């Protein structure tokens, strides 16, 4: 648990979009998928996922529908809308730029760290 | 990552949906979160836990269930209403916990809102709301530019109507009183004599029957028709539909009822609703004299009409003035200074309308200032409360509540208070307005107060309540935004919140100072007004209204004409004199002084031969009187003689004039006796007596000229008899009235009359100063109340903030005086400066008051002493409790506690 990284503010939405982009998921599925694609390296409060999901639905980036899960339980499934797909692409690019910039900034001056 | 808003339409749909499907939404969120926990529990179970343990663990891992539910709502944007309900509930709970604060705040606001609502509905009724006729916007009255009075002569009306190119027809009306005989006892009724095109120019349709029109007029006495007002038809004809076509007697002449005007149409004056309308061409039957050809007599009718589309008021005035100069050239004997102005027809011309507007606007301004002051006070009360609650606020901040959320809560509290205050204030004002509309200061006239509240009034009250809520709610915002929870919790309640007490001059102090000044101003004005009113009640009117009864009769109503009139009048006077207890009886034609304005006539010096209006020496009020009038009225004869019954048509024309008349026309009283002057028609009149000056048109008028002519030489069928009685008769005016009525009935049962004491009749003249005094008094009381809450708030606040310091001072041996000085010095300084400023301002503005209230002067030691005393009392009252608190500080207890 202790070696898990805290999420930067705002990054949860990006992770949710990315998780759902691989196929429709219910809420718990999103959580598992994020764990899976991040190698369980991120600390996510389980309940915090849902306000994020609702926010994305409100913004029209996700759409939700009720279905039945693999455990045979009723669950709400989320999938990306076209706008969501577009947003994911933009956000991914800008994240990559940011990450590269920060990484390069941090590796430039080894003697001052 | 930024989160731009979704499409507005979808957002709106969602918001509306969530508003109505809240419970469904809740259930859905609940189900989804439960599904999550179940899925997690399934996984945990698979890893070897038993089901119950797995579910427990899943719930723990999930975290704060309620918090996430709430956050989901927030994410959906559905939280607004819910938060609001929550906040309102919380506010009500908080307010219930401090009922003193709540009551003071709500009442303060209720009073301020009520004052505004009442004044606004008067403003709305008298000035903003147009006449109840189609296209009232383009309806203009024509007044003379010289005196802003809308009266014109009938021939002038015809010229204006036919020669102008600016109006879609011009109509006119005149107010008159007639005797209506429907077969029972004759009654008096106030009517409009109107031009034939009156209803067509106004473009209104009858409720019943039809209106008379311009085509019904064929010269004098050609259109004996009546159109009833709806209200009169309802009360006097009991909604009888068969009334159309009926013939009734007006002043003993047959008139036919042709129609009923629509409901809500009360003629073209705002505060006067006539019983019915008759064509002006028939006025001679009702007035006893023919005014239709009297070009020089301009006091006949008010003229109005709709401006043509595209014609500006300035163009219309130019058009009218060109007609005016044509008339001046054509009829130099009758016309002078014929330039015109436009006005709203509903308030009797700008001569009346301007002061009314100014007064109501002034009241509105004062009411607005009172509301502002109330807001300022409530603001500082709120700020003090926010400071007192700084621990609570700090705790909530420390626990992670957003500042916005806390501010929202404080605002909700302010709005709750303002809405409650607004509702109570509005309720109070509706009661007051109901009473005001029913109140009739002139029982003899069918006055109508158009002040009942309408949608505008409710809207304004609500708006004012909301705005003031935001205003005083905004005062503590800075405090909350800058509050540092760490500091506050560490150092106790005397933290940075409200820490500005030590500073030299805060905005709040300034507000309070302004408010005290305003209060002192109001107190000054009201004391000045009250003093003026008291003085004007004891002033010399030039007659004595006490112990006198007025009997109004109009002999034309009973069919008397010509020579029959003075005979009957003499018989009436003789009959009154036989009543026991009556000292003297006099009669004055038309109306007595200080009753309904002046019947002004131009007069000429004896040597003037060219009797055109421009050459007139002066204007003088004309009164036709019986020989004993001066004795009955209590007017002192200074010199010469009064009249006898021998001053009749065959004897030389004589007059008694007042001292001002003598001074202006003859230079002095002694020169005047025996001197001659000329009337408009060239008649030479000899002055035989001089009486004291008096008040004739209004209490506040400048010295005015008056001439008294013998009733036999200047007959008038309408008259007031002045019956002066012994003082003890005053105790039972009813008995006297009964005796008078029975005597009149013996003379002529068909003659309607109206009795009142002269004092009652004076109510009209005293109305304006009384209204001014009452409203200023009410405003002054409100201002005083506000200042008291303001000062005591400040003082209490400063005492509780400096408790520790005061305690140390007391412990170090400070005397009571020094403690008080430390605790309340600031409040008293504000009080002193504010009062001084207010008193000075009051002295300045009282000059304005002098126009309304007779002899209103602030240069009266009693007034100034009164103001100082009132403000001192107010200060004592406001600081009493805080002073007690400051003195009762027990240093040992204080030091133990903190």
Image (spheres, rainbow, N blue to C red):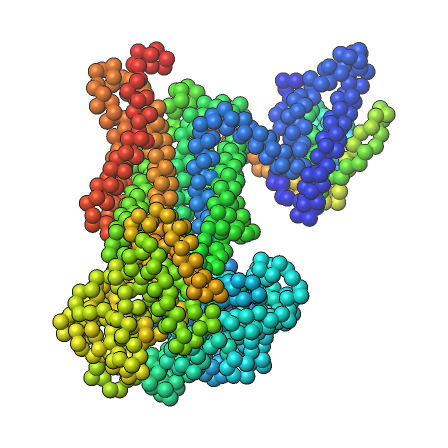
Residue B43 in the figure: left or right of residue B322: right
Residue pictured at 29% horizontal, 64% vertical: B629
Q: Position of residue B123 (x, y in %)?
A: 45, 55
Q: Work out which quarter of the rendered image holds the C terminus of chain B and state it.
A: top left
Q: Nearer the viewer, residue B567 or B692?
A: B567
In the image, B252 versus B238, the foreground residue is B252
Residue B498 visible in image: yes
Among the 4 quarters of the image, the one containing residue A62: top right
A35 on left or right of B133? right
The quarter of the image holding the N terminus of chain B is top right
Image vertical order of residue B50 relative to residue B870, above or below: above
Dividing the picture into quadrants, the one containing residue B691 is bottom left
Q: Residue at x 45, y 36 (%)?
A: B107
In the foreground, B407 or B822: B822
Residue at horizontal 56 percent and vertical 63 percent from the top: B184
Which residue occupies 62% across, 36% down?
B81
Q: Is residue B214 above or below residue B120?
A: below
Report the number of discs. 0
Residue B418 visible here: no
- Is residue B437 placed above or below B826 in the rendered structure? below
Q: Which residue, as the protein is rendered here, is positioned at the far bottom? A: B330
Left or right of B234? Residue B868 is: left
x then y, percent, for residue B708: 27, 70
The picture places residue B733, in percent across and down from the top left corner, at 38, 50
Residue B415 appears at what percent x and percent y?
Answer: 51, 37
Answer above or below: position of B6 versus B345: above
Q: Nearer the viewer, residue B682 or A21?
A: B682
């Amino acid at each position: 648990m202790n070696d898990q990284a805290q999420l930067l503010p705002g990054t949860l939405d990006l992770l949710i979009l990315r998780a759902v982009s691989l196929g429709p998921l219910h809420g718990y599925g999103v959580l598992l998928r994020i764990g899976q694609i991040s190698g369980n390296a991120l600390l996510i409060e389980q309940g915090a996922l849902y306000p994020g999901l609702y926010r994305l639905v409100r913004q029209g980036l996700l759409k939700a529908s009720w279905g039945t899960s693999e455990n045979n339980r009723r669950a709400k499934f989320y999938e990306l809308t076209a706008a969501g797909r577009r947003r994911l692409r933009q956000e991914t690019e800008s994240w990559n730029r940011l990450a590269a910039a920060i990484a390069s900034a941090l590796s430039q001056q080894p003697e001052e760290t | 990552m930024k989160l731009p808003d979704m499409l507005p339409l979808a957002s709106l749909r969602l918001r509306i949906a969530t508003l109505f499907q809240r419970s469904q939404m809740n259930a859905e969120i609940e189900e989804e979160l439960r599904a999550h926990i179940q899925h997690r529990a399934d996984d945990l179970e698979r890893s070897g836990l038993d089901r119950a343990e797995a579910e427990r663990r899943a719930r723990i891992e999930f975290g704060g269930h309620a918090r996430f539910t709430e956050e989901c709502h927030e994410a959906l944007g559905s939280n607004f209403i819910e938060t609001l309900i929550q906040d309102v509930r919380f506010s009500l709970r908080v307010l219930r916990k401090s009922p003193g604060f709540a009551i003071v705040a709500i009442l303060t606001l209720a009073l301020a809102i009520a004052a505004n609502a009442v004044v606004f509905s008067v403003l709305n009724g008298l000035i903003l709301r147009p006449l109840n006729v189609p296209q009232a916007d383009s309806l203009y009255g024509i007044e003379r530019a010289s005196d802003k009075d809308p009266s014109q002569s009938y021939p002038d009306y015809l010229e204006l109507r036919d020669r102008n190119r600016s109006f879609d027809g011009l109509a006119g009306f005149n107010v008159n009183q007639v005797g209506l005989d429907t077969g029972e006892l004759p009654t008096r009724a106030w009517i409009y004599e109107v031009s034939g095109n009156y209803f067509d120019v106004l473009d209104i349709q009858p409720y019943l029957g039809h209106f008379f029109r311009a085509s019904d007029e064929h010269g004098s006495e050609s259109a004996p028709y009546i159109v009833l007002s709806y209200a009169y038809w309802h009360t006097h004809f009991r909604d009888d539909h068969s009334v159309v076509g009926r013939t009734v007697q007006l002043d003993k002449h047959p008139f036919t009822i042709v129609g009923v005007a629509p409901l809500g149409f009360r003629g073209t004056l705002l505060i006067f609703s006539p019983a019915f309308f008759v064509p002006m061409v028939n006025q001679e039957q009702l007035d006893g004299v023919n005014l239709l050809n009297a070009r020089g007599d301009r006091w006949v009718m008010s003229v109005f009409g709709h401006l043509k589309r595209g014609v500006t008021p300035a163009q219309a005035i130019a058009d009218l003035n060109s007609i005016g100069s044509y008339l001046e050239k054509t009829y130099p004997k009758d016309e002078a200074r014929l330039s015109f102005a436009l006005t709203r027809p509903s308030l009797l011309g700008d001569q009346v309308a301007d002061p009314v507007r100014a007064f109501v606007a002034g009241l509105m301004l004062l009411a607005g200032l009172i509301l502002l002051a109330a807001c300022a006070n409530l603001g500082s009360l709120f700020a003090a409360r926010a400071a007192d609650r700084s621990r609570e606020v700090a705790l909530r901040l420390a626990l992670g509540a957003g500042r916005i959320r806390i501010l929202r809560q404080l605002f909700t509290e302010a709005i709750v208070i303002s809405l409650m205050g607004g509702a109570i204030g509005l309720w109070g004002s509706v009661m007051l307005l109901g009473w005001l509309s029913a109140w009739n200061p002139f029982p003899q006239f069918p006055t109508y107060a158009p002040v009942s509240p309408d949608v505008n009034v409710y809207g304004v009250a609500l708006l004012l309540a909301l705005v003031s809520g935001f205003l005083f709610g905004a005062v503590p915002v800075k405090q909350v935004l800058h509050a540092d929870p760490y500091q506050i919790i560490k150092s106790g309640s005397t933290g940075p919140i409200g820490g500005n007490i030590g500073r030299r001059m805060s905005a709040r102090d300034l507000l309070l100072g302004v408010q005290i000044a305003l209060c002192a101003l109001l107190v000054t004005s009201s004391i000045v007004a009250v003093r003026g009113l008291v003085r004007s009640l004891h002033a010399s009117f030039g007659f004595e209204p006490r112990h006198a009864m007025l009997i109004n009769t109009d002999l034309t109503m009973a069919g008397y004409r010509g020579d029959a009139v003075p005979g009957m009048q003499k018989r009436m006077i003789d009959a009154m004199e036989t009543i026991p207890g009556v000292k003297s009886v006099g009669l004055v034609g038309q109306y007595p002084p200080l009753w309904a304005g002046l019947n002004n006539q131009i007069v000429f010096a004896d040597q003037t031969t060219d009797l055109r209006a421009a050459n007139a020496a002066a204007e003088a009020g004309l009164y036709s009187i019986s020989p004993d009038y001066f004795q009955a009225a209590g007017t002192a004869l200074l010199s010469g003689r009064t009249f006898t019954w021998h001053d009749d048509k065959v004897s030389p024309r004589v007059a008694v004039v007042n001292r001002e008349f003598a001074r202006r026309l003859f230079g002095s009283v002694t020169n005047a006796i025996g001197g001659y002057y000329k009337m408009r028609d060239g008649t030479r009149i000899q002055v035989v007596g001089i009486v004291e000056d008096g008040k004739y048109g209004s209490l506040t008028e400048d010295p005015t000229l008056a001439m008294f002519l013998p009733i036999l030489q200047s007959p008038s069928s309408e008259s007031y008899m002045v019956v002066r009685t012994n003082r003890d008769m005053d105790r039972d005016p009813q008995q006297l009235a009964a005796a008078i009525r029975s005597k009149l009935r013996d003379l002529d049962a068909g003659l309607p009359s109206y009795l009142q004491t002269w004092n009652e009749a004076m109510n009209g003249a005293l109305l304006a100063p009384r209204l001014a005094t009452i409203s200023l008094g009410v405003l002054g009381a409100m201002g005083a109340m506000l200042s008291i809450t303001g000062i005591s708030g400040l003082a209490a606040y400063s005492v509780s903030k400096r408790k520790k310091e005061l305690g140390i001072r007391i412990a170090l041996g400070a005397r009571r005086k020094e403690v008080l000085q430390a605790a309340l010095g600031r409040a008293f300084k504000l009080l002193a400066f504010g009062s001084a400023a207010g008193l000075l301002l009051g002295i300045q503005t009282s000059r304005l008051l002098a126009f309304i209230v007779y002899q209103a002067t602030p240069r009266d030691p009693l007034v100034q002493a009164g103001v100082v005393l009132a403000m001192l009392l107010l200060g004592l009252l406001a600081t009493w409790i805080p002073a007690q608190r400051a003195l009762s500080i027990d240093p040992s207890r204080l030091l133990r506690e903190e």
